[in-house]
Image: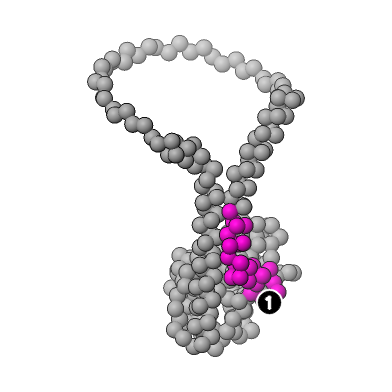
Amino acid sequence: MAETQVYEMEIDGREHRVETSVGDGWRNEATWWVDGEEIATATSRVEDNLYLVVSEDHELAASLGAVRARFTGLSKPLRATWFEGERRTAEAVARIGMGGLDLVPEPGSLAALREERVRSQPRRHASLHVAKGVANVVVPILIGIVFFWLVRRFGLPSIPWPSIPLPDVDLPSIPWPSIDLPAVPWPDWELPGWVRWALDHVKYMVPIIIGLALARSEVRRRRQQDELRARRAAGGPSARGDGR
């Protein structure tokens, strides 16, 4: 990897280091080292999560755990998370996404700046997610307005589609039975105005609500990870946070 994002942390007396690609738009790549020894590497052109697991015959296979490197849809690294335990168990937990300990991104890197932004400016972080949700609603509408304006201004291009002579098949008429079903007197319900308005605009509100929920989840997750790192540094119990 020519340009990398580095994540590091000392865990249970061992130095863990994960290097990921930084987003060329074509491939995600991650490599995991422990105490300077390369443990595992993974590459994918389609997966947003790469799972790094120690080999079965390694002397630390029963205790070294596993790592999940997560990327955005544009191949930008989000985080590298370590999961404790025996290799198979740790990999299974990593794939489920429960628990885990985020390794610390290299100071000054984009990942470190992102963590600091979430930590110090949670409202601004939430506002950015809401703005993305608004953009997901507004941009398609603007594109549609421009498209229809162009159609009215210049018209649609005329495409000379070929004429295909289809055979004329005279199918027999089937005398289906006529069944006189009784009329059901359904109650005449009138929805409140605010409910009708919400139903009419729900497709516009969903992306905004999802963006706000994701932002709040990331802020809560960042706080849990900070507490978990502090307990680890103080030699406390290996509490589990939300590693999703």
Question: Which residue is at a point 65% across and 35% down the rendered structure image?
Answer: 144
Which quarter of the figure has residue 139?
Answer: top right
Coordinates of residue 84 in the picture (x, y in percent): 48, 78
Residue on which the image places disc 1: 107
Quarter of the image with the N terminus is bottom right
Q: For the magenta stretch, what is the residue range?
A: 105-130
Q: Which is more toward the observer, 191 or 35?
A: 191
Q: Is residue 234 visible?
A: yes
- Seen in the image, is 162 located left or right of residue 213? right
Q: Residue furthest left?
A: 182
State the SS at label 1: loop
Decide whether the magenta segment is chiefly helix, strand or loop.
helix
Q: Is residue 126 magenta?
A: yes
Coordinates of residue 58 in the picture (x, y in percent): 52, 81
Q: Which is more toward the observer, 188 or 137?
A: 188
Coordinates of residue 181 in the picture (x, y in percent): 25, 20
